[in-house]
Amino acid sequence: MESLAVIKHDAVPWLRLVAEAWDHGAIAPAALFPAPGGVAAQIVETIAGSSTEMAVFLACGSLRPALEAYFAEVRSNLGPHDWALGVCPFCGAPAAFSDVLEDGRRRLACHLCGGGWFFPRTKCPFCASERSQDLLRLEPESQDQGYLIIACGGCRGYLKELDRRVRWNGQSALVEDWGSPHLDLIAHRAGYRRPVPVLIGLSQPI
């Protein structure tokens, strides 16, 4: 909550409401979990003045350390062909980032629990479209070699993708995602959105 207050100063009154609701039992950790309305949907519905960006940032910052430890022992049980959806097989959150590994396979990443799973490169993780005319690649500037924006013309969703065959020294999916806000600007200006809000959206409209 302190980190969110630093990033978005006008979120302080909202954070006070969240703290009061927590103290009075109106919300519990489950309010931060993924639900049909999205990650932390219960907070958005319960707390006045909530935005999806603030609620999801709070969820990722609060839950990830605990969920990473909670799921640590079961990660290895997920085989490369065991899961075919674009949501995290561990916590149910939407895909937040895409990596292309050294062997050419695509691995989606979850920012909420730190999970990862393999997913076809020819399929939209949001609407499952496999129509080649729907799947687009938005190329950033030349100095961003290895980075792509994978977009779907059908559902208008997008993910940022890092080709680790080119950027072999890339950092974790979360660091790479939050460290490349200029790619989000490119995608948003082209009319695409993603279900996991972008960090830059907390500090300014995009």
Image (spheres, grey):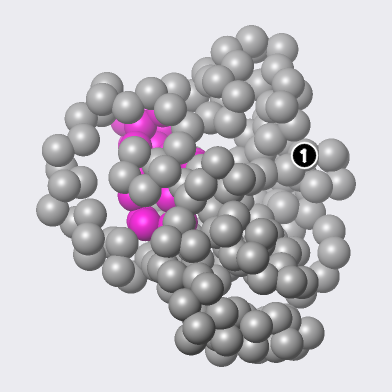
Using residue 54 as the reference point, say whether residue 35 is left or right of it: left
Q: How many marks?
A: 1
Q: Is residue 65 visible?
A: yes
Where's residue 87, x and y in %? 45, 37
Judge the density around disc 1: few (<14), some (14-19), many (≥20) Cα neighbours within 10 Å. Answer: some
Which structural element holds mark 1? loop
Instruction: Indicate the position of residue 65 as horizontal and vertical percent values.
Output: 33, 70
**Residue at horizontal 66%, vertical 38%?**
158
Q: Which residues are magenta?
A: 95-119
Residue 155 vs residue 158, the one in the foreground: 155
Residue 112 included in the magenta stretch of the image: yes
Left or right of residue 33, residue 2 in this image: right
From the image, which quarter does the N terminus lie in? bottom right
Residue at 15% x, 43% y: name it: 76
Residue 12: image location, x then y, percent: 70, 88
Q: Nearer the viewer, residue 40 or 90?
A: 40
- On the question of residue 160 being in view, the answer is no
Q: Position of residue 50 (x, y in %)?
A: 71, 68
- Towards the viewer: 178 or 82: 82
Q: Which residue is mark 1?
A: 192
